[in-house]
């Protein structure tokens, strides 16, 4: 559903490779030998105190800053991890940064883009899900630790490379582990706590308030809340959406945790967020309506389920806000459809929706 725009930061595309697939096929033997020679020279000149992680010299530990909080647990397969990431090419090109999750560093490097979401990654931890170098680095860390690693391409972006990373190129990256979540159930519980905390804070300062959403039978739904900002009388069902009808909507979607604008077809919101779009501060929209096929079968909808929940039993012309867990959004796996604003697993969101008309 999220709109793809021409103004996203190219560096962010590398993150999809980091955690949503393993690296590409290994380079040829001669290419590997050339890389190993480059890595060996780099270590000898720039990092004489580095420790080899792989017997063949293809991965090196450059720095390890351990936590002082007493945490000792390490990620286990099928757990989830939240971490910061900063990746660079080799020291001869240390100014070439292919990815950072730190907006301040992006500003200092002159690579900052208003449409890029600079935030820690939240990822499924499994050897078949994430890049081998990253998996190895995180596997030896405890919460609060920070590691800097030099890796050959076949543990990283491989012969395919990535945006900002040429094929068969060694990389240096620093990763800081912020949190370990034991399993999927714990990840969902964590996400629901985020939503409930947001709702509590919101309701203490705002009216109308966010209320727990219900399905078509009136049964409360866990993990999703709706604020009916401006709605037609709820007993007026004449213009309410019916299953199969296509609705014209305006919307703005945000990451719940930090309020960053994820996507919008409302020009004023994009303008305020500093996006480089063809709009002015007084333009209400800069693209056509989002067409949504409504369904009262809330949990079987193929589209974003939160839209169906929020629009249930309200008439055209209504405006709502909806706060929800991934159960009603992009699912437990998230999505990297928009490279500069990926939605990681178990990420709660907030959407403002204006129900303009029924097609």
Image (cartoon, helix red, strand yellow):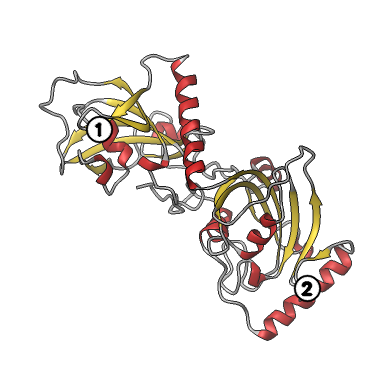
- Disc 1/disc 2 C-alpha distance (Å): 57 Å
Q: Residues within 10 Å of mark 1 (few under 14, many from 20)?
A: some
Mark 1 / mark 2, whichever is N-terminal: 2
* Residue denoted by label 2: 57
Classify mark 2: helix, strand or loop: loop
At 80% from the left and 52% from the top, the residue drawn is 64
Side of 181 where 281 appears, left or right: left
Classify mark 1: helix, strand or loop: loop
* Residue denoted by label 1: 215
Q: Residues within 10 Å of mark 2 (few under 14, many from 20)?
A: some
Say above or below: 301 vs 128: above
At 31% from the left and 41% from the top, the residue drawn is 305
Q: Nearer the viewer, residue 4 or 245?
A: 245
At 77% from the left and 66% from the top, the residue drawn is 53
Q: Which label sits on residue 251?
A: none
Q: Position of residue 60 (x, y in %)?
A: 78, 65
Quarter of the image that includes the C terminus: top left
Snapshot quadrant of residue 244: top left
Side of 14 where 69 appears, left or right: right
Q: Position of residue 151 (x, y in %)?
A: 71, 66
Snapshot quadrant of residue 14: bottom right
């Amino acid at each position: 559903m999220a709109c793809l725009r021409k103004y996203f930061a190219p560096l962010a595309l590398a993150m999809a490779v980091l955690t949503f697939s393993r690296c590409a096929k290994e380079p040829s033997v001669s290419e590997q030998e050339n890389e190993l020679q480059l890595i060996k020279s780099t270590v000898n000149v720039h990092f004489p105190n580095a420790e080899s992680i792989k017997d063949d010299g293809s991965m090196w530990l450059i720095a390890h800053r351990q936590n002082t909080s007493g945490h000792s647990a390490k990620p286990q397969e099928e757990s989830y991890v939240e971490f910061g990431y900063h990746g660079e090419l080799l020291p001869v090109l240390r100014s070439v940064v292919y990815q950072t999750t730190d907006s301040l560093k992006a500003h200092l490097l002159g690579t900052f883009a208003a449409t890029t979401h600079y935030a820690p990654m939240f990822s499924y931890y499994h050897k078949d899900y994430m890049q081998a170098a990253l998996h190895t680095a995180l596997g030896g860390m405890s919460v609060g630790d920070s590691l800097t690693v030099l890796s050959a391409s076949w543990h990283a972006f491989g012969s395919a490379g990535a945006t900002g990373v040429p094929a068969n190129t060694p990389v240096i990256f620093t990763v800081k582990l912020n949190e370990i979540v034991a399993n999927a159930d714990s990840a969902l519980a964590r996400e629901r706590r985020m939503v409930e905390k947001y709702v509590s804070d919101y309701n203490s300062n705002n009216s109308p308030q966010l209320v727990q959403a219900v399905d078509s039978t009136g049964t409360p739904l866990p993990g999703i809340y709706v604020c009916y900002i401006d709605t037609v009388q709820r007993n007026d069902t004449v213009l309410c959406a019916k299953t199969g009808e296509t609705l014209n909507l305006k919307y703005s979607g945000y990451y719940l945790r930090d309020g960053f604008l994820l996507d919008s077809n409302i020009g004023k919101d994009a303008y305020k967020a500093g996006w480089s779009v063809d709009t002015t501060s007084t333009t209400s929209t800069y693209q056509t309506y989002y067409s949504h096929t409504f369904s009262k079968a809330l949990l079987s909808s193929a589209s974003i389920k939160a839209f169906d929940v929020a629009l249930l039993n309200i008439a055209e012309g209504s405006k709502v806000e909806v706060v929800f867990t991934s159960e009603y959004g992009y699912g437990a796996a998230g999505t990297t459809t928009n490279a500069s604003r990926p939605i990681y697993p178990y990420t709660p969101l907030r959407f403002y929706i204006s129900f303009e008309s029924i097609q």
